[in-house]
Amino acid sequence: MVKIESYNMIDLARIAVIIACVGLLYSPSVGTVGLVGAVAAFLASGQAVVRLKRVLSRPSVYWALLFLGIVLIGTFYAGVPWAVRWMDLSKWRTILWFVLVLAIFDERRWRERLLIMFIAGTAVGAIASSAAAAGWITLWRPPEHLLRISGTQGMAFACAALICAWIISEKELIRPVPWVWPLLGLVYVTNIVFVTDSRSGYAILGLGLGILLSWKASWKGRLLIVAGLLLALGLALVVSPRMYGKVQLAVTEWAHESELEGLTSFGIRRVWYLNTVEVIRAHWLVGVGTGGFPEAYREHIAGKYPSEDWRSLATTDPHNQYLGIFAQQGIVGLAVFLAWLVAVGRDRSGPPVYRNLAVAILCGWCVTSLFSSHFRTFVEGHMLATFLGVLLAAESPPRPEPPVGPIIIEGATG
């Protein structure tokens, strides 16, 4: 039998992570193959225990696992069928994916390979989407939904734009063809502003750029950067009716929810939030249990609204990550989750140069998760976990060279 070296299996796991990171944006099936392949290769490498022990001492890991433990405990007191509890628990597998990626991306060349492949994968989508919006080509899907849905597309393009900005600011990292990064960054930003109607993309791009640009700046410089970004936002709203319409619509729907006659995206969100807060008041300590929110919400609004009123629409998710955790795991679960976010933001175990990009992306997710559950959704949750694991992984010593046996020279006898 031919023995496969363990380091080759770790490299195979890294390749599978790259496939998952890019594949999830286009096809859940391809992404799932990458996810399963990475786990299988990692377990088959023979290094799983050693690598996991290496990362378990990090606060960003033990707070993550502590939160996962609280979610697991919540399955024992939720008043819903076990199938529902396990299904809800499985959505937090993004936590385990973060730990796995953190354990295997301990080499700089593999970090760069993943970032470059993510740029390549999203660049194809951004260029094709922009070309279709301009009428130059025809796609099988609307240009704003080329990467599954507009929210996913906007978030992916925003992350790609942040990576380009980060590469430009850290010139010593990825040197080849330096003119490509500003050009691609412009493509991503243009697509987000004019094509992809994703408010999540707007938030990640704006907040992320603010963090990246002000990371090494003085306080005066940071004020100038904030002013410049606000000016750029105002200009974007002026030149892009699409972007202005999406932002104005959200504000209007939220502010005038009580006056709306029909179902709207942000109108129903406000109703869900208000009712979820009322559910939390009755179960603030430990919550309703993992998977128990949908049933608790239905019981709470039963008879509260006329059956024909759009406000009577039930939900399985309050569309706010923090309220969702508070409702199901209580104040203890929310506190541990927030502690994990702080631990990730303060994690300095990896090379410092990657940390600012990790914090920029994490802060973007924290904001968008006020209006969704992006830490545990299939695509967005795994995308964030991948970036955090790759960017925060600690550097390991160079892998050992294979032993070289004695050299025997056979000479001719005469």
Image (spheres, rainbow, N blue to C red):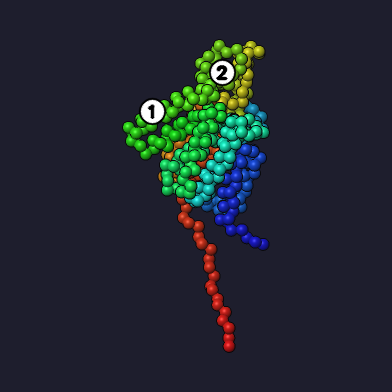
In the rendered image, which residue does mark 1 sit on? Answer: 227
Is the residue marked by circle 1 packed among few (<14), some (14-19), or many (20+) residues within 10 Å? few
* Image quadrant in which the N terminus is located: bottom right
Tell me, yes or no, if residue 176 can be seen here: yes
Is 212 on the left-hand or right-hand side of 18?
left
Nearer the observer, 284 or 142: 142
User: Does 297 appear above or below 30?
Assistant: above
Nearer the observer, 280 or 210: 210
In the rendered image, which residue does mark 2 sit on? Answer: 267
Residue shown at 58%/41% (left/top)? 121
Q: State the CA–CA distance, disc 1 to disc 2.
A: 31 Å
Q: Point out residue 225 in the picture as x, y percentages from the top left corner.
A: 38, 32
Which labelled disc corresponds to residue 215? none
Is the residue marked by circle 2 packed among few (<14), some (14-19), or many (20+) residues within 10 Å? many
Residue shown at 58%/88% (left/top)? 414
Q: Quadrant of residue 97?
A: top right
Is 24 on the left-hand or right-hand side of 226?
right
User: Does 22 appear above or below 308?
Assistant: below
Q: Secondary structure at mark 1?
A: helix
Residue shown at 60%/43% (left/top)? 20
Q: Upstream in the sequence, badge 1 or badge 2?
A: 1
Q: Point out residue 258 in the picture as x, y percentages from the top left corner.
A: 55, 12
Q: Amino acid at mark 2?
A: Gly
User: Does 256 appear above or below 140?
Assistant: above
Q: Secondary structure at mark 2?
A: helix
Nearer the observer, 135 or 220: 135
Q: Amino acid at mark 1?
A: Ala
